Image: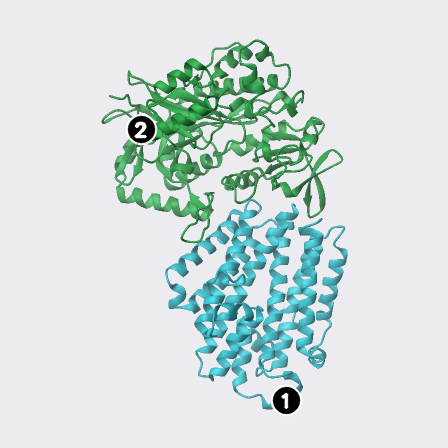
Amino acid sequence: MKPMFDEMQAAAGQVRAHYSGFDRWLQQQSPALMAARRDEAEMIFRRVGITFAVYGAKDEDGSGTERLIPFDLIPRIIPNDEWLRMQQGLAQRVTALNRFLHDVYHDQEILKAGIVPRDQVIHNAQFRPEMMGVDLPGQIYSHISGIDIVRAAQPDGSGTYYVLEDNLRVPSGVSYMLENRKMMMRLFPELFAQHRIAPVAHYPDLLLETLRAVAPPSVNEPTVVVLTPGMYNSAYFEHAFLAQQMGVELVEGQDLFVKDGFVYMRTTQGPRRVDVVYRRVDDDFLDPTAFRPDSTLGCAGLLDVYRKGNISLCNAIGTGVADDKSIYPYVPKMVEFYLGEKPILENVPTYLCREADDLKYVLDHLGELVVKEVHGAGGYGMLVGPASTKAEIEEFRAQLLARPSNYIAQPTLALSTTPTFVESGIAPRHIDLRPFVLSGKSVQTVPGGLTRVALKEGSLVVNSSQGGGTKDTWVLES
Amino acid sequence: MLSRTADHLFWMSRYMERAENTARMLDVNYQTSLLPQSADRAQQGWAGVLGISELTWAFGQKHAEMTPENVMHFMVRDEGNPSSIVSCLRAARENARAVRGTLTTELWETTNQTWLEFNRMLREGTFDRDPAALFEWVKFRSHLSRGVSVGTMLQDEALHFIRIGTFLERADNTARLLDVKFHALAGDYFGAWEADDAPEVDFYHWSAILRSVSGFEIYRKVYRNVIRPDKVAELLILRPDMPRSLAACMNAVVDNLGLVANENSGETQRRAGRLRSDLQFGRIDEILATGLHAFLTQFLDRVNDIGAGISRDFLVPA
């Protein structure tokens, strides 16, 4: 039988200690009450407008392309000791990744030492030669990192945390972490009275502190802005939310312009200088004169200002070279190389299809593996072997053979589950976790992160664009 | 504040105000149409509704007949008509969404909820069953968003631009309403009119105008007299204490404009101030003597010009 790991139940009818309080409470709630609470949550999310955009879709009520991300009422609970260890591991990993980025864009010691293959980096589409030799405040590149973590069942019934991927470009989802908590506190205040749940609401404060800490050194009172692609972007709610919570302007590319080596925004009282941009726009669209010329989302001349050190971008340009799936397998080695420490968080064992031996193994075991595009995101362009038909596997095999270096493969993990409300009642569904790591003066994390849940039975894909939902994530204080 | 943000705030409140005024006008016309009157008069009323918004042509493209049902459908729920209530509420909400971080949570949620609820009411047939209830609801949602703006927003530029939008739009709408309603009576009304021979049917005509701007009781209170067209015009044009009059609107526009002034806005302020003083020191007999229609047409041009100036100086600077 396939190994399984449920976060709440060690075995049928046997609830893990850190879920016992919640379980007692849940037993006392009638299904009708929980159903009413679910409706209430949905109503509130709609009114607050916590929605994401689906391109090309239209709702019957005319709300255009906006959808709610399903919210599940059963929280994911993490015991304190597990969290403390994870937190250390996250800080260690993100520190190493930032060291790697600085190294790659400066002396390239790690390439010289032969630890990461040079052409993997230099010929990576995410490598930005424009960043060579550019010195950044604090030598930090990824100020906001979203590290995706899963727990996989082992044959002995235990569960192991693995890092599934690093998101160092414009990781999103933190607003859901915050709104989910707010919702749970509103719906079930008694649960928060009964448990010691570590708070998360100070995230925007930490974020602002981080952004201010990495302003150009000559600036005393930095002006921070959030740069959004606009209200039709799928994460627009989050951009607006974070700007509001931090009390900074939410700008679009059209609001910015470059003059005499600095970036300004157009205000009702004339131009005002901008020092730090928390940008939620991809590298490619940031500056039409440097990257994609057809971009209307960026600001012409931004790269020049950036290279002169007259503005800080968070995250930096060129971080994609470190969160690429082809670089991922080397992260544990980075930890050892830069920090001289054993990695606290483990990687999922990964096969690089660019290497002949690995490719052969992958081709022979397509039915068992998960194969991913190196640059893919959002759960697209991947093959989940065990869940695919023969025809799908063969179709994918052809794609893989055409461009092997475009793919990596990993064993199908038996992702852990938590009980989740579904149509037929409460049933186990697979989950993952995205903690958000902030790197400024120091490395900080709010306890927990965003838990995503695959609502379809048996599905391992948690992305909101593919029918995933979210849960509140509790770290219990001891 | 960002120019683009100010632009969205300005239009958010303009569209909300426009939705309210459209609802007011439709409501009064609908109520009037329930009175016994000649078919001509009712027809005139519905034609007036379209005329006010300069939509007669667009309406004709879609509907062969000017029935009350057709006009109301066109002005309430036709998404292809940019001045319909549904279009205005959508635009108000889209503008709010674009700057939701600048709005207080209460104001954003009020605007969003108005949009969601309005659609629900259309879907569930509230409008078909009871148009008056829907109009009333739209009016009150507009009152609510204005109240929530003033009651929760920091009194900074953001609020000032919201207020400018509200009052500029209201000035425009009141002027249009007056123009169409006075014009609805044949010819240059004031040339022929004598105080003593006002026909009875006109009571309903004038009281409808007053009701559409919540001015019926105010009129009685201010003039303590029978309803006379010249007084109606005076109330809606010159009385600074009548909240929907042109004078009151221009006072609010000028005051708020003064609070956001920048180094480019001098000329726009001058023009707005000039318009205000024309109302402040104007007299209704003079206005009527030179012709109400000419006066209102010119007023609309000047309001339009001030709107363009505000855009140029603050909202979309080059």
Describe the element under mark 1 as helix, strand or loop: loop
* Residue B215 seen by the camera: yes
Q: Which chain is green?
A: A
Q: Is disc 2 on the same chain as disc 1? A: no
Q: Amino acid at mark 2?
A: Lys
Q: Is residue A475 left or right of residue A259?
A: left
Return the mark for residue B194.
1
Q: How far across and how far down the image is residue A358, in percent? A: 42, 15
Describe the element under mark 2 as helix, strand or loop: helix
Q: Quadrant of the N terminus of chain B?
A: top right
* Residue B144 seen by the camera: no
Residue that carries the numbered disc 2 in the rendered image: A390
Q: How far across and how far down the image is residue A173, in percent? A: 47, 34
- The hue of chain B in the figure is cyan
Return the mark for residue A340.
none
Q: Is residue A76 left or right of residue B265?
A: left
Tell me the chain of label 2.
A
